[in-house]
Image: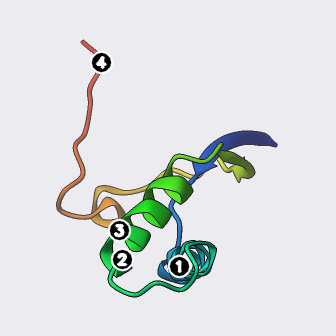
Amino acid sequence: MAWCEMKINAPSEEQIRRRAFELYVERGRQPGHELEDWLQAEFELTHRPFRVARLPLFRSRQKISPRQRGPLSVRFSKH
């Protein structure tokens, strides 16, 4: 079985919310910096080192008819 590696680095809204709250607490809970904290948290989480997930890569040996491929499929012929 072949494997492909996929980089996963998109933070969830909950992760951003938690980090923004941590920044707020680190600042001494001073109000008025909500947007700054959110943007800083989003930046930090987006630019952290990548996690790499190894996912199985399946190759089908089954022939697929044009009808199964759907209307947007393109057939390539050998010339």
Q: What x and y, as percent, mark residue 16?
A: 51, 74
First of labels 4, 1 by sequence position: 1
Q: In the displayed structure, would residue 74 be above or below residue 9?
A: above
Give yes or no for contact between labels 1 and 3 (Cβ–Cβ under 8 Å).
no
The residue drawn where x is 53% and y is 54% is 44
The Cα atoms of the two marked residues, 2 and 4, are separated by: 61 Å
Mark 4 or mark 1, whichever is nearer to me: 1
First of labels 3, 4 by sequence position: 3
Mark 1 lies on residue = 24
The residue drawn where x is 44% and y is 61% is 40
Q: Which mark is residue 78?
A: 4
First of labels 2, 1 by sequence position: 1
- Do we see residue 24 in this rendering? yes
Element assignment for label 4: loop
Q: In the displayed structure, would residue 44 be above or below residue 35?
A: above
The Cα atoms of the two marked residues, 1 and 3, are separated by: 10 Å
Element assignment for label 1: helix
Element assignment for label 3: helix
Q: Residue 45 is drawn in which quadrant?
A: bottom right
First of labels 2, 4 by sequence position: 2
Give yes or no for contact between labels 2 and 1 (Cβ–Cβ under 8 Å).
yes
Mark 3 lies on residue = 36
The Cα atoms of the two marked residues, 2 and 1, are separated by: 8 Å
Q: Residues within 10 Å of mark 4 (few under 14, many from 20)?
A: few
Observer-nearest residue: 71 or 13? 13
Q: What x and y, as percent, mark residue 27?
A: 55, 73
Q: Which mark is residue 33?
A: 2
Give yes or no for contact between labels 3 and 4 (Cβ–Cβ under 8 Å).
no
Q: Which mark is residue 42?
A: none
Amino acid type for the residue under numbered disc 4: Lys
